Each structure stands twice: as C-alpha cells, then as structure tokens.
Image (cartoon, rainbow, N blue to C red):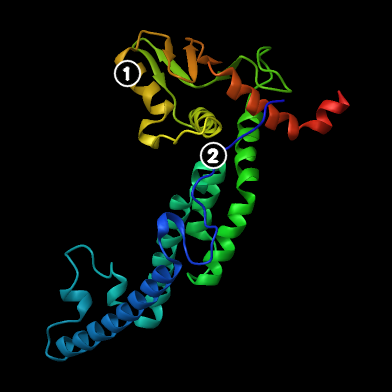
Amino acid sequence: MSELTLTEPEVLIGHTDVICSTRIERIVTGRNAALKQIEQLIQQLDAISRLTSEIGGGAAQDWAMKVGYRYDSWMTENADKALPAITRNIDRSIWRDLMLKSGMMALMDAQARDQWHKNLEEGDLPAIDEANILSTFEQLHLNKMDVFERGIINVFKGLSWDYKTNRPCSFGKKIIVSNLVTHNHWGFSLNWGWRRDQLADLERMLFLLDGKPIPDNRGDVTTRLMDHIRANPSKDAYEDDFFSIRYFQKETAHITFKRYDLTEKMNDIVAKHSLGMLEAK
C-alpha cells in the first residue's frame, strides 16, 4: 500500500480566523448591521409610500418598480414579511461563500455538491453567528477526509462491471465508461449528464492526491475534452497529464490512467472501504 497524502485545503481551525483570514466577527457584525439598515430602509420606504398614496401618487409598488416587474422586490413588502426572506437570502449567500473559501467544495463529488446546494435552497439554514460558523466548519474540518474518500468511492461505484477491464475490487490501468460521447454524421460530441460529472470528479480527485490546485470548472477535463471534440469532431482520442481517452462510435470511452502512483493511492482508498467485500471473496 502506498502512503496517502492529501494537501489540506484552507479550512477553519481557530476561533477567530475563517477562510482566507476573514474574521468571523466581521462577517457576523456586518450581516447584522446590514439587516438592521435594511429594516430601517423598508420602514422609511413604507412611510414614503403612505405619503405618496395619500396625495394620489400611488404606493411604492407603483412608482418604485419597472414596468412588468410589479411587486418584484422584497423592499416594498411589509417588514414582517420581507425581513425573514431577505435574511435567508443573505445567510444563504454567506454560507455559500464560506463553503467555497473553505476548500470543502473541492473535496465533494458532484452528488455531494448537488445535495449541499439543495440544502441551501430548500433546507433550514443555521443563522449566521459565531457559534454556528465555528461548529459547522470545525465539523467539516474533522470530516474532510471522509468526504474526500466518499467522492472516490462514488466514482468507483459508478463504473459498470459489464466491461472486463473494469475490476470490481480496484481501479485498473484503464476503465471503460458508456454514454460519455455521442456520434452522428457530423462526428463526435460530448454528452451532458452524470457521466460527464463523473469524469470531472475523477480528475479533481487526482489533482488532490497529487497535491496540486484544482482547476476552475471552466477549465476542467470535461471542458477541455469538449473543446477538443468540437475542434476535431472526426478524431477519436484525447490526452492530457492524467488521462489518455479514446472514444468510439458505440458511445463508449476507454480512459487510461497515466499516473500509476495516483491510481495506487485511489486503490488504497477503495480497499479501505471494501475490506469486508474483499475478505468475503
């Protein structure tokens, strides 16, 4: 077994400093001050609205909105109704920003990221205060290796065992996936969907295992592969530092790993999470 080393992202570890030296106190104080000023602004706007209504000039919903956007702003609603919605929107954005700067998003696979975003949109958000920020990111810090390893396991479980090259106990030198590309009389094109996410997840894991910064998603392997296919629709191969990918008209793709040392590290993780299965065989 190789020794697994993972370059840790910047994650909250102290009681005053958050990601990128941003101070918790500044976040909490700024958020509370902004909400207080927003409340005062809504009340002031409501008073002005009553005045203009009394003189026949209409309410704020009439003169403050663009044509076709009537009642489209929380600022023209009653404070009791508007403030909870505005608070949730601000808190959601703060949590999203903290999560991105923490480095935790880089450790998550596509499924975990989708669940996080769904929780932000639909779940009950903890209020932005020092205790909640500390407890949330300290727990994430403790669980970051589990999150990372789960990403690798989910990629591994997503492989089809219909292909002999795909080994049910470890990543081999090459894996075969289906539905990564399509082919027609114009040539090849890259599919959207979970298979594409899986390839991006795989590249991200390899970058982390190699201790290198993860590229922006606008420059990940799926974007580069798509650009390559668009520029060369009749070609059937792509290559970069981590992968050699050959794709076929039957819409399968053979992905060969070029860094065997990193493949071995992934297999250490697969073995760690599959001991029971391996012993039973």
Count the labels in the image: 2
SS class of the residue under badge 2? loop
Query: Badge 2, how many Cα within 10 Å: few under 14, some, many 20+?
Result: few
Q: Which residue is the site of mark 2?
A: 7
Relative depth, front residue between 61 and 191: 191
Left or right side of 15 for 220: left
Q: Which residue is the site of mark 1?
A: 230
Write the residue at 43% across / 18% down: 240
Relative depth, front residue between 22 and 32: 22
Vertical position of residue 122 compared to residue 74: above or below: above
Gap between marks 1 and 2 measured at Cα:
34 Å
Left or right side of 133 for 162: right
Instruction: Write down the quadrant of residue 230 in the picture.
Output: top left
Seen from this angle, which residue lies furthest right? 280
Query: Badge 1, how many Cα within 10 Å: few under 14, some, many 20+?
Result: some
Q: Quadrant of the N terminus?
A: top right
Vertical position of residue 51 compared to residue 152: above or below: below
Question: Counting residues from the N terminus, which is met first, the one under dot 1 or under dot 2?
Answer: 2
Q: Is residue 96 visible?
A: no
SS class of the residue under badge 1? helix
